[in-house]
Amino acid sequence: MLMKVDLGDAVADELNLPFEQISLEMIYRGLYHFNVAYNKGKANHPVQYFSDPKNQHLGIVKRKRKPNTKLIIAPFPDRQRGQENFFFQNPLTSCSSA
């Protein structure tokens, strides 16, 4: 585990990104691809391999998440805005008593 954290930190420094944007799981999974490239003589160092733009498909950098949006379930939203049932509410989270 410590090796993955150090490798992730080095890749983050190489890419000038915060450590939180690096996926340690994908680095672990990408070590197989690095090993294959190393055995073929195409890669020498894992930090350069993971930070190479040609290897972006490995998913080392986490994707930005979409913002949470409310689902409008009203059949005619322009006419029904302001009513109680305008937005979808998850019954598991909107229940006030158990």
Image: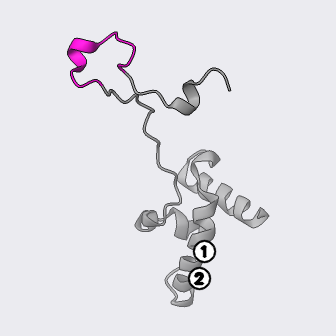
Residue farthest to the top?
A: 82
Q: Quadrant of residue 55?
A: bottom left
Rendered residue at 21%/13% (across/down): 79
Q: Which residues lie in the magenta part?
A: 74-86
Q: Any mark on residue 97, and which?
A: none
Q: Secondary structure at mark 1?
A: helix
Q: Is 27 located above or below residue 63 in the figure? A: below
Q: Residues within 10 Å of mark 1 (few under 14, many from 20)?
A: some
Give the colour scheme of this rendering.
one colour
> Please, what is the three-letter code of the amino acid marked with disc 2?
Asn
Residue farthest to the bottom?
A: 40
**Which part of the image, by quadrant, shows the C terminus?**
top right
Q: Is 91 located above or below residue 57 in the figure? A: above
Asked if labels 2 and 1 touch by Cβ distance under 8 angstroms, the answer is yes
What residue sits right under mark 2 in the picture?
35
Q: Nearer the viewer, residue 90 or 71?
A: 90
Q: Is 52 located above or below residue 95 in the figure? A: below
Which is the main secondary structure of the residues drawn in magenta?
loop
**Which part of the image, by quadrant, shows the N terminus?**
bottom right
Rendered residue at 28%/23% (across/down): 74
Instruction: Estimate the spatial distance between the alpha carbons at disc 1 and disc 2, rounded to whole Å.
Output: 6 Å
Q: Is residue 4 left or right of residue 51?
A: right
Q: Any mark on residue 31, and which?
A: 1
